[in-house]
Image (cartoon, rainbow, N blue to C red):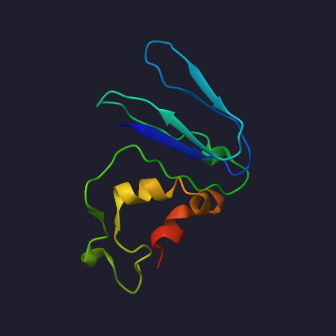
C-alpha cells in the first residue's frame, strides 16, 4: 500500500496529479487530513514544493514509505546538544494513530503520539 498524506491547517486546496497516464486530479477542500493513493515508480523523486513559499510556518510530514518494526534514533546521535525529541515507536501503529480524531485535531500528531 502506497499513500501520500497531506494536512492543510490553513484550509488551502490540495491538488495532486497522481496518474502517470494523464488520469485524474484529486482535490480536497475539507480543511483537514487528505489521503491520496498513488504508486510512483521506484525511481521517482518526490518534492514537497510549496512549503517554502508559505507566508506562515507549516509543518509537513511525508509518509511515502513504511517500515516494519520500531523507528528510533541511534543512541550515538543523542547528546546534550541534540536531545531525544521522540520516543521509539512502531511506524504502522503511528499511521493508524494519525487517523484518530485526537491526531487530526492536533497541531503535531507525532509529538502527541511519541514526543518526549
Residue 90 quadrant: bottom left
Residue at the location (25% across, 77% down)? 76
- In this view, the residue in front, 108 or 45, is 108
Residue at the location (72% across, 55% down)? 56
Q: Residue 14: x and y, percent?
A: 64, 35
Residue 73 quadrant: bottom left
Q: Residue 68: x and y, percent?
A: 26, 54
- In this view, the residue in front, 21 or 89, is 89
In the image, residue 70 above or below residue 116: above
Q: Residue 71: x and y, percent?
A: 31, 64
Q: Residue 77: x and y, percent?
A: 30, 74
Image-based side of 51 in relation to 65, left or right: right
In the image, residue 27 above or below residue 47: above
Residue 102 quadrant: bottom right
Q: Quadrant of the N terminus?
A: top left
How many numbered tags mark residues here?
0
Amino acid at each position: 500500500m502506497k499513500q501520500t498524506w497531506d494536512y492543510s491547517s490553513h484550509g488551502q486546496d490540495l491538488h495532486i496529479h497522481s496518474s502517470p497516464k494523464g488520469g485524474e486530479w484529486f482535490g480536497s477542500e475539507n480543511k483537514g487530513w487528505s489521503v491520496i493513493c498513488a504508486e510512483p515508480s521506484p525511481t521517482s523523486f518526490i518534492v514537497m514544493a510549496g512549503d517554502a513559499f508559505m507566508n506562515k510556518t507549516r509543518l509537513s510530514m511525508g509518509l511515502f514509505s513504511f517500515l516494519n518494526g520500531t523507528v528510533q534514533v541511534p543512541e550515538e546521535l543523542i547528546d546534550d546538544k541534540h536531545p531525544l525529541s521522540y520516543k521509539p515507536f512502531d511506524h504502522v501503529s503511528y499511521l493508524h494513530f494519525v487517523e484518530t480524531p485526537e491526531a487530526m485535531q492536533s497541531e503535531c500528531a507525532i509529538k502527541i503520539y511519541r514526543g518526549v
